[in-house]
Amino acid sequence: MMYHAVDYAGHPKGNMVTPENFSYQMDYLKNHGYKVISLDELVRGIKEKRSFPKKTVVITFDDGYQDNYHQAFPILKENQFLAIIFVSSEQIGQSGYLTVEEMKEMKQYNVTVGSHTLNQAYLPSVPPKEQRRQIEMSKKLLEEKLGYPVEYISYSSGGFSEAIKAMVKEAGYKGACTTNRGTHRFNEDVYELKRIRFSNTDRSPLALWAKLSGYYNLFRKHRAPF
């Protein structure tokens, strides 16, 4: 599951869910028997070729907006749901973005942080030297600020290449998330994990069932890595 902002205004329409609709979507998971696991557990399971129960989900957020703390975190905490928020290290503490203190508090309730590059750079559009800097330095800076290992990265706008994946592995990340980009439809490769975007229009049982059923990946449009 991929989210961005949990708010009322100030974000692109497809990237925003109101707090009320986010709460409804989390209630749907709880009331329909879904198990929320960490991204780390998913990646370990894929590497071990383990099968997960059908109603198993991972909750992720991109960009590190401050509303993730003020609006989404209380709902996640109430439901005892794990999640990961991908943060751009140079944007920490800027207006509208998470602070170090907020991220440390969320970690106590199993809402962890991953890298979203230094500044949401679209990696395929920058030179290799800058790609490596964005990948390596974002991890280093986050770990210095937070005091715990940052083991996952989300590609900004989902863009990546085989060379970028290799840099991510070399930097010590255990896995990486994209959007609907890539070549592996069923997430066999932990360095290009596809996600499904949930938006403010997903507010009916049918819409949520469709996206969570597993069949959604069979029919939605897939895009090249970059």
Image (cartoon, rainbow, N blue to C red):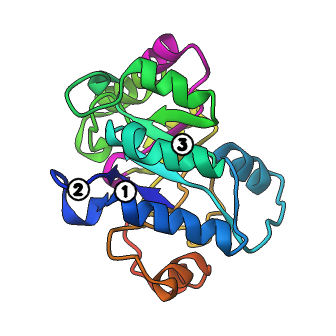
Name the residue located 39 percent from the left edge and 46 percent from the top edge: 71
For label 3, the SS is strand
- The residue identified by callout 3 is 84
Q: Is residue 69 above or below residue 178?
A: above
Quadrant containing the C terminus is bottom left
Asked whether 124 falls inside the magenta stretch, the response is no
Spatial CA distance of label 1 from label 3 is 18 Å
Quadrant location of residue 200? bottom left
Spatial CA distance of label 2 from label 3 is 21 Å
Q: Which mark is residue 19?
A: 1
From the top left corner, tell me how far across and down residue 49 is, in percent.
Answer: 82, 60
Quadrant location of residue 120? top left
Q: Amino acid at mark 3?
A: Ile
* Label 2 vs label 3, nearer the camera: 2
For label 2, the SS is loop
- The residue identified by callout 2 is 8
Spatial CA distance of label 1 from label 2 is 8 Å
